[in-house]
Image (tube, rainbow, N blue to C red):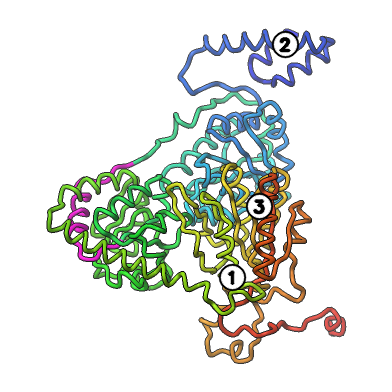
Amino acid sequence: MRELVARYLSESISRRGFLKGLTTAGVSIAAAQSILDSVSAVAQAQEVRRGGPEGVKIFQGTAAAAFAEQLIASGVQYVFGNSASEDAEFYDALVDRSQLQYILTPHEGPGAAMAAGYVKASGEPSIVMQAGSVGLMNAMGQMFNAFKEQTPLVFYSYRSEQSGAAGRDGFEEVANQEQIVAPLAKYYWLARRPEMLPETVRRAFKAAWTPPYGPTYASWHADFNQAKIRTEIITQDKVDPRMRVRPNPKEIERAAKVLVEAKTPLMIVGDEVYKAKAASKAVKLAEMLGMSVTQARQIFASFPESHPMWVGALPGGRIDTLAFPKTPDVVINVGNKLQHNSTAPMVPRQVKFIDLRNDSWSMGNVITTEAPLVADVAYGLDDLMVAVDGMMTPAIKAKVQERSEEVRKATERNKKLRAQLVKNPDWNNSPLLADRLTYEVAQFAEKDAIIVHEAGSIGLHSFDFNPIGGRELFFYYGSHLGSGVGTAAGVKLARPNQQVICLVGDGSFIFGPTALWNMARLELPVVTVVYNNHAYAGPHSRAIANVPDGRMVATGKFFHDYLGDPNMNMADIARGFGVSGEKVESPGQLKEALARARRATQDGKPYLIDAEVRRTGAAWAEKPWTPAIRIAQLRTRKV
């Protein structure tokens, strides 16, 4: 018994292991529990006597258990993983650590999307675990999304080979595994010794959560998990720089002067506004200057879309495509990554450009900057409003009032144009118009619903997104397909009291339906709506745009986009994962299905609607062509 007590006090065995040792030695369960309580009190007193820095403790035990301890110290509550044999010691450590909840995901890709959705919606850290190099490959599509979206998500997978056998082309071994992620990760590291596991994990979380955010990757040899070590466990607040930077005062003065003197200023908002909870500040600055507001492609809606200064999203990613204002002379970007898809900059050279965000690395790479404001956007907006207010004169205020009225009139015109949507002559036809489906879902959505959008190039109208207490948007900025369903599951896990609706195209859905199983298992009542036109409509349209005079358009023979013959039934797929669902084709069926979806989610159950929608755009035949390759033909071929 003395040896058992010593091992428990040195933290080399768990509470469960201590109890099992006592009962094996013949001690009754009641007596063993009494001894455990007494020894635990001694352990706590021993910890107090040790003293030492706050937030730092010495741990003795397996490296895998130290890994679990460091995750707890780093503020992690949920671990998203796919079964990995070499992580057995870690799973064993979870038995006595109820603070960590392990969520088994059937596939690494949707599992990583689920973790990303949780991080985006909660603002809390999480980790994705994969099985060695092969599991990492499955998750890397979502690592790409996290890289593009600047999501602070930590990835981990062990190296399958033992440390002493590395370099011998072992089972699942790949040389320099940690370097595979180099183009996508802010930080990647292979722990050199077992006792370095907690330090490697701390660094991964520190790098991921230091602005600008991004994914990180940690790895170590599989046998390290089994090693007995003595190491430090440190809480994240002791190593995290908690970096929130104020902008340069001189640049603030310069930016304020440019804005106050502008004739037609335009604000572009982006994800940093949402992340910093600064939407109300962006609204105030826009109102102070009578400034139009738009948004380039981003994950979140960062400005109230019903506000009079909102002129709609930026079409095609260029400001010269806006209907209003047609010719802005000053553009201020607040927290948008500004993804450039054209050889010409999205803000023309002759327009004065102010850049306010925390990503200094990408500032000035494409667009020349009149006033670079490297800062946390909440602080930057605070300082900018003070500077602008100090420069206001009666004449400028009169000009602002006049400009505000012009923007309001343009906004009202836009609203009237959007209202014409319901006058489409095919509005009540079957299969559904994609616009009709979106409209009905918008009427169904609750006032504070969260819309997870991976439905391709549909017009996302009628929701009136508002990050200040209204409906929120989680868009698929990264573009690696298969993220929508997993993201929605993670969002619901983080925001259980808000309605979550996932809009997903049929092509996107089929990349990642396994997260439906997690919705069913965890009772995450998400409504999933599939826009099913049995086609990759985006690639179809882009092929026509790229080769408008080509043979595909002339003959109507498109090899790469038709997903029918046979048609996929997404409702049947959902039922296979334990989620109720149904197919709909008409507006009447859709309304009835949405009513059933509401009842199901109120009972805590997820629901899927597989909606037949019309293919729209150029060169779609009545019956799409597909090459007639059949097994019967293949059998007749000579080899």
Q: Which residue is mark 1?
A: 434
Residue 290 % position (x, y): 26, 59
The answer to whether residue 174 shows anywhere in this view is no
Q: Which mark is residue 188?
A: none
Was residue 534 drawn as part of the magenta stretch in this picture? no
Within 10 angstroms of label 2, few (less than 14), some, or many (20 or more) residues?
A: few
Name the residue tied to disc 2. 3
Mark 1 or 3, nearer chain start: 1
Residue at mark 3:
598
Q: Is 39 displayed left or right of 546 in the figure?
A: right
The residues tagged by marks 1 and 3 sit, at their Cα atoms, a distance apart of: 21 Å
Pointer 2 with pointer 3, Cβ within 8 A: no
Which of marks 3 and 2 precedes in the sequence?
2
Q: Label 3's element?
A: helix
The magenta stretch is 245-266
For the residue pair 68 and 64, the one nearer the viewer reads as: 68
Helix, strand or loop under label 2:
helix
Residue 632 is situated, as x and y percent measured from the top left of the image, at 86, 82
